[in-house]
Amino acid sequence: QVQLMESGGGLVQTGESLRLSCGASENIFNFNAMGWFRQAPGKERELVAEINVGGRKDYSDSVKGRFSIFRDGPTNTVYLQMNSLKPEDTGVYYCHARILRDRHYWGQGTQVTVSS
């Protein structure tokens, strides 16, 4: 059973940075893509950033230029570097991995709160 474990969330002020980590229980290159979703209170879960097995990176328009997704193969870890944080970035951030388009795996989530 695939396990994804997030860490790195917390409470920060507007303009500060955080780095989220997602450790996978198996080789991250077994997945077609890994990424980060977030869910704000009362809103649907949305994709923030994704990196596919070939290294292509995609970002939501709201985080382009501020967030960066990258990975470390030897430690089976995917990171989300979040800079210039805004209050609207507040939410629970979930690590996600997928195999093709029909097998999805989720972490337990980590809370990010950005105060104004």
Image (cartoon, rainbow, N blue to C red):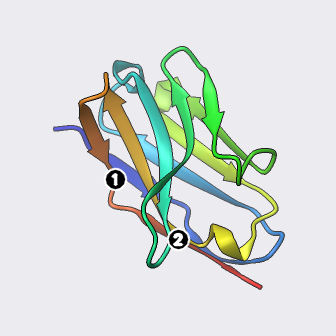
User: In the image, which disc is placed on residue 107?
Assistant: 1
In terms of sequence position, does the residue under pointer 2 or pointer 1 come before the other? 2
Location of residue 53 with respect to 95 vertically, above or below: above
Q: Which quadrant of the rendered structure holds the C terminus? A: bottom right
Q: Secondary structure at mark 2?
A: strand
User: Please, is residue 108 above or below residue 32 in the view?
Assistant: below
Q: How many marks?
A: 2
- Using the rendered view, name the quadrant where residue 71 is placed: top right
Residue extending farthest to the top is: 54
Residue 37 at x, y = what percent? Answer: 48, 52
Q: Is residue 100 visible?
A: yes
Please say whether residue 76 is visible from this viewpoint: no
Evaluate if marks 2 and 1 touch, with contact meaning CB atoms under 8 Å apart.
no
Q: Amino acid at mark 2?
A: Gly
| C-alpha distance separating marks 2 and 1 | 14 Å
Q: Quadrant of residue 54?
A: top right
User: Few, some or many C-alpha atoms within 10 Å of disc 1 (few <14, some 14-19, many ≥20)?
Assistant: many
**Horizontal side, residue 32 vs residue 57: left or right:** left
Closer to the camera, 44 or 100? 44
Q: What residue is at 49 percent from the left and 59 percent from the top?
A: 38
- Secondary structure under the numbered disc 1 in the rendered image: loop
- Numbered disc in front, either 2 or 1: 2
Q: Residue at x 43, y 49 (%)?
A: 95
Q: Position of residue 80 (x, y in %)?
A: 61, 47
Spot the residue most to the bottom.
116
Pinpoint residue 5: horizontal percent, then vertical percent: 37, 52
Q: Amino acid at mark 1?
A: Gly
Residue 70 drawn at (x, y percent): 62, 34
- The tag on residue 91 is 2
Report the residue at 81% width, 45% height from top: 65
